[in-house]
Image (spheres, rainbow, N blue to C red):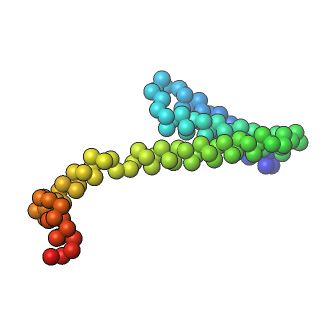
Amino acid sequence: MYATFAFAITMLGVFSIFENIKGNQKFSVLKYYMLLTIICFTTSSFFDFLNFSGHPIPYYKEISRIIGAILVLNMLFLIAQKLALKPSTVSTFKKKIFVKFKVESDVDLYKILKGL
């Protein structure tokens, strides 16, 4: 029964890989990471299928899962970098605050922060 589930997950992964490749779309770094993650988890499911079928391959499944986990963490790091505030946005925000409080020098800023 578990071999059937592992084989179904493997086939789902294979079809997902083909869906991501077809269409002649431009590949970004994030899409490469997603594709490599799907490949790692698909191979891990295939090794599960082999293990449940009576043909154990001892270490490749764990290696594939570790590589997949590392790829997921790298992909999340890339997403976080992409969504982080840009330095120009922060400087624009600072300028708006300085204009609102009529800060023209460091002394004015110090006086506002000290509440004088």
Residue nearest the viewer, comparing 85 with 94: 94
Coordinates of residue 53 in the picture (x, y in percent): 85, 42
| Residue 95 x, y percent position in the rendering | 18, 54
Q: Residue at x 18, y 61 (%)?
A: 106
In the rendered image, the quadrant that contains the C terminus is: bottom left
Question: Residue sitting at 86 percent across and 41 percent down?
Answer: 56
Residue 100 can be seen in this image: no
Instruction: Judge by depth and name the residue closer to the eye, 106 or 66.
Output: 106
Tell whether 57 sits left or right of 110. Answer: right
The residue furthest bottom is 116
Residue 17 place in picture, x, y as percent: 60, 33
Q: Quadrant of residue 63?
A: top right
Q: Residue at x 27, y 49 (%)?
A: 89
Q: Is residue 74 above or below residue 14?
A: below
Q: Is residue 1 left or right of residue 85?
A: right
Q: Is residue 17 left or right of residue 30?
A: right
Question: Residue 114 vs residue 8: left or right?
Answer: left
Q: Nearer the viewer, residue 81 or 38?
A: 81
